[in-house]
Amino acid sequence: MENQLISTVVHDRLPDNYVRPETQRPRLDEVVPDADIPVVDLANPDRAAVVAQIGEACRTHGFFQVLNHGVPVELMVAMLAVAYDFFRLPAEEKAKLYSDDPAKKIRLSTSFNVRKETVHNWRDYLRLHCYPLEKYVSDWPANPPSFREIVSTYCREVRDLGFRLYGAISESLGLEEEYMKKVLGEQEQHMAVNFYPKCPAPELTYGLPAHTDPNALTILLMDQQVAGLQVLKEDRWIAVNPRPNALVINIGDQLQALSNGRYKSVWHRAVVNSDRPRMSVASFLCPCNDVVLGPAAKLINEDSPAVYRDYTYAEYYSKFWSRNLDQEHCLELFRA
Ligand code: OGA
Ligand code: NI
């Protein structure tokens, strides 16, 4: 029900169905503050160094930030601003887009999977299919009036960046530059515009609980003023500070499979705070449904047997959405 959206009313108390049991709370005082996640400057003319840095980051963190990534900074600012404007629209306007059906390609929703979950998350989100743009843009929100133009320009730029990163990531695994592009084929692109309102009890709940991303590669545009993303590193949660003008990149489950487990699709979560609302814009590149995925042949040998079996993305994705976010790593169900 659209009245479940949390961005339409101000809450002075956390409703009971958002409160996690004691053992599942974020324990914010144990989080490593100001953590360093690797930073890669894509303008570095030494291509081999860039490839090596990306490879190292994918192995050790599954996450990195990119600078000089080619997505214009004004566009990033405009994207975040129009996202805020969208969530400030009147409740009646937002209600038109509300759906809790994960199969819908364009929908405004809340939490994660409200139909299945028992405890909700302190997040509203707008989910959009973005590729090919011509197919979807006319179904996107018509308000704010600049939404479609800004978001489609942003989508094109981010897609281009994603494909450049595929080249570097392929090379870093010793594969030909075009490998991922070829194997993943013409890919879908989805966007989650995540809005985390101010929360009256951030210690008791999540914006998004721990999860890994089921797609291939994620490009995250974070609010430059408010932190909230945390990444699991050696059994501790580390807080990622927004770096001016950077985009955050993470390896999704499909690249972990493709790399035969060399690169990790790492657990991450979003926490909330009581001072300020926070926005993030996640762009997901993902294979089409009928694409067959599995470890690259070149990465399988006697010392490194296939860790995962082959499967289609359709099979993977339906498994992912049939579960709760914070269960075991979904890839565990696809072991060879
Ligand atoms: C996601 C995600 C993190 C954030 O949307 O998959 O991990 O900081 N978001 O919003
Ligand atoms: Ni995620």
Image (cartoon, rainbow, N blue to C red):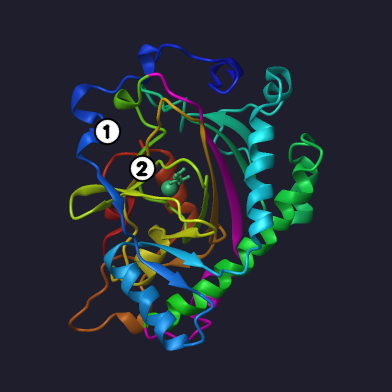
Quadrant in the picture for residue 185: bottom right
The residue where tag 2 is placed is 269
The residue positioned 40% from the left and 32% from the top of the image is 272
Which of 109/231 is in front?
231
Mark 1 CB in 8 Å range of ligand 1?
A: no
Determine if residue 129 is in view.
Answer: no
* 269, above or below 5, in the image: below
Residue 277 image position (x, y, % from top left) = 51, 31
Residue 175 forms part of the magenta stretch: yes
Residue 245 image position (x, y, % from top left) = 55, 58
Q: Could you tell me the amino acid type at mark 2?
A: Arg
Q: Which residues are magenta?
A: 174-200
* 277, above or below 254, in the image: above
Question: Residue 214 — which label?
Answer: none
Mark 2 CB in 8 Å range of ligand 1?
A: yes
Horizontal side, residue 29 vs residue 291: left or right = left
* 140, above or below 49, in the image: above
Residue 216 image position (x, y, % from top left) = 46, 61
Quadrant in the picture for residue 88: top right
Q: Secondary structure at mark 2?
A: strand
Count of all numbered marks drawn on residues in the image: 2
The residue positioned 57% from the left and 23% from the top of the image is 7
Q: Are marks 2 and 1 in contact (CB under 8 Å)?
A: yes
Residue 89 forms part of the magenta stretch: no
Q: Earlier in the sequence, mark 2 or mark 1?
A: 1
The residue positioned 30% from the left and 23% from the top of the image is 204
The residue where tag 1 is placed is 26
Q: Could you tell me the amino acid type at mark 1?
A: Pro
